[in-house]
Amino acid sequence: MTRGYLSIVLHAHLPFVRHPEHDRFLEENWLFEAIVETYLPLVQIMDGWLRDGMDTRLTLTLSPTLCAMLTDPLLQDRFVRHIDGLIELSEREIHRTHWDRAYHPLAQMYHQRFTALRDVYFHYGRNLVGAFRKFQEAGKLEIITCAATHALLPLLTNHQPSLRAQIFAARDHYRSCFGCDPNGIWLPECAYADDLDLVLRDAGIRWFIIDTHGVLHARPRARYGVFAPLFTPNGVAAFGRDLESAKQVWSKHEGYPGDVHYRDFYRDIGFDLDYDYVKTVMPVAGSRSFTGIKYHAITGHGHDKRIYDRNAALQKAAEHAQHFLETRMRQVEHLADIMDRPPLVLSPYDAELFGHWWYEGPEFLDYFVRKAYFDQKVFVLTTPMDYLRRQPTQQVCKPSASSWGEEGYWKVWLNETNEWIYPHLQVAQERMTELANRFINPTPLELRALKQAGRELLLAQASDWPFILRTGTSPAYARKRVKDHLLRFIALHEQLTTTKIDEKWLGHVESLDNPFPELDYRYWSTLK
Amino acid sequence: MKPNPPKKTASKTAKNSGQTQGKAASKKSPASPRKPAAAKESPAPSPEIPPMLLEGDEPSLVRQSGPGSRYALGQEPVPAPGAAGELGDLPEAYGTQRLLLTARDPHWLYAHWDLTREQLKHYNSRSVDRHMVLRVYRNEITGEPHREIHVHPESRNWFAHVGLAGTRFVAELGYYRPNDQWVRISTSGSTMTPPDTMSDDLSVWFETLPADMRLEELVKLVKTAVKDNVPLMEAIQQLRATGMPGLPDRRSAGTGQWTPEQERAMTQVVSMDSVRRVWMGSLEITELIRRQFLQELSSQAAAQLGQTGSWSGAVSSFSSPFGGGMERKKGFWFNVNAELIIYGATEADATVTIGGRKIQLRPDGTFSYRFSLPDGQYGLPAVATSADGTDSRSADLKFSRDTKYRGDVQAHPQDPALKIPSPANVA
């Protein structure tokens, strides 16, 4: 007998990185690696579920910036160049490992895998947004949106028009990608603050996810903890993250991905082999980078790693899927014994964990969903919206401000390394509202400049830049991106208010920062 | 723009001192002078570069990658000038005199004041202390401030410890004239620190919102009878009490008996203690792992890690989330390996196999392939067959490798810190 529900939510997001002014650009590889290692494998496994007639459910965020990049012709061309380079390199690897028999089968595996993934990419006309849309329209996937550029929304609450623009621009973009309104939204970094629900309500959003303490600290106390959603004061459902299932997947020592059978992330031929040999796939001449061809398993620290055994790793993924299934069944049964309604366990993860960081992650997910569908009746896989259809009555509470970042709030995005961004944003945001209030009936050229100003502001607001400044993975790039977008905004503001619009320059900037082509600048207006 | 490290360090030290002053710095406290430690500790002259921009240029202390930290690629080159490069740099301030105040977590606020260098100089010179003061109040600007912080004369921002969760704060920026006369420059909007405890309010209110009912329609419906600023759920409740038609029916689910035993059992399932143990958001996981990994290394190795800076960004030696990462070599080391290059040419439309596997020829009929050459003896047949299949040539290549190692010599990897060899260096 079905006693409860489980919802797996994957959050796929990357910042908007597109540099037509350069032939190759290092940070564009964020997208290409994620396509190869996460998004295409996800499409493959969901195709398998459809093929096998499984009536199952998954939820996936596709952030607006990610959708914009996945459908951008330039980046599509560059992705094809990227995967062609990998296929060519793996072909050479088959030869190179001719006498290195331990590596040889792995070289063949990579070649077959890259070739198959390329086939999937072309099967969907190079349009992965369309691929995921197919699964949504088949009723197997709920695609949700995110803030337009993944801005950390609680840091925008002192400028309501910016909050509105981030949410409404995202909704509009979702409509253009998927032909319907989004029901759910992934609040960037699960960051929620008081009254955010009002903007969500106005955008017709029905649900979002918050971290566990956002529910535990709700006022009044949430009777069912994170095992049932809350209705916020404005009627949007807030689903809390389940910790137990999170820990099993995330944690290195307690979690699955750290198992020694799985593929090691860091040993990569991009660093192991002679530079001249691998330079064809390096995004920047003279620098080494990851290629995605890795031959070793996680076996302790240092270089003495065991050679990766694909079959053993897949066997382990199946065992972990079985373990995850059994613990979820026990968890749901235990909760159902206590609660007076069927519990919901909601397990959100970064999508890129599956495949990019945890190479066997997609197979784990595939095995788990299949086992959950065929092998048990304790819980049903669902999406948050399906759950709300079944359970329209919920407790009304005010969730607590929170995020899933370090220490649970905004410290990652607001600290000594990145606070310099916010005063600039504050001024730009207010100026954008002034522009929106001032230009009621703009000329076509003014309209272009207003839209571009809005785009630059949205791009400058992305939480990715302060995050990178904090973690130090590409700080120079993040700093430059913030400055570039703010400077472009300042120039546009000046041209619109005091000088005149430089159409040639505007055209150039439009060609660089081109997401949200139909952006409505009036979202920043405060006029009724 | 290049930062100025010595001045910056001074500024940071000053800031930390100021943050820990607490009420001791209150002007009402006779035991403590109003002069902040910050000002005393920082005799540096006015910096040429404002701290606001320097802080953005600070090299990050945390170098890592992992789930959530998805931005790991390898060595980060210096960004090429972009299309906006010609636009110069951001202004150091705009001079709006606005005071921005925002809660960062249950215990800390961030304040920023937008003053140009000239404005800073002006207000500092009017202050009896030669610096400005940030006053933080609970709820509204009245009575005694919750915190009074004497800020560094060159600062434009402060992280202020308030230590009160779930509380509304406002702030004002100003300075003292002689005789404790307070002059206000700017007032902030209010901000609320998030609560960090479970609510004592155990009241329960259930409401029904059918998923197929559009929120927009519901809002329209209640707006006819309830003011704009009443939250939707409260408005529905009010209107239901008046018997208004068209509202969703409230169903009985969840409104039955809920016993203290059930309440206790639910509390045991998930508690804030467990939340804190596994708080692992997008950055948390890598933070935890980094700490764990560092603990696992010997203190000597950890010290070496701290000293070496040549491993960049994503491949930092202690950053692997699901793998051991690449450990920095200690002391002298040597890696050497051997590969063969088989190269040749034939008619462009011919078929060539090496070791029995068909290879791809370049458009001009040339080819070049590398082979890993472990110790041992090997044969490699290379066969070329003409396009019409009527002619064929072959070569049986024979190789052997026999390596004698002395000391610890590894085959891999290359050190990513090494520069790419130039032809002159390898000739």
Image: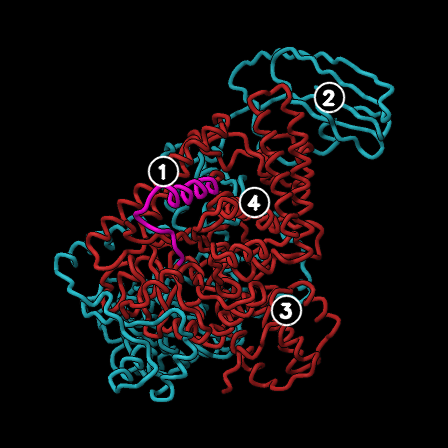
Chain colours: A red, B cyan
**Label 1 residue SS:** helix
Q: Which mark is residue B354?
A: 2
The residue range painted magenta reads: A361-383
Kind of residue indicated by mark 3: Pro
Check disc 1: other Cα within 10 Å, few if <14, some if 14-19, many if 20+: some
For residue A393: magenta? no
Q: Nearer the viewer, residue B114 or B242?
A: B242
For label 1, the residue is: A322
For label 3, the residue is: A517
For label 4, the residue is: B73
Q: Is residue A143 at least partly visible in the picture?
A: yes
Kind of residue indicated by mark 4: Leu
**On what subunit does the disc labeled 3 rest?**
A
Q: Is residue B81 above or below residue B306?
A: below
Kind of residue indicated by mark 2: Ile
Check disc 3: other Cα within 10 Å, few if <14, some if 14-19, many if 20+: some
Q: Disc 2 and disc 4: Cα gap in Å?
A: 34 Å
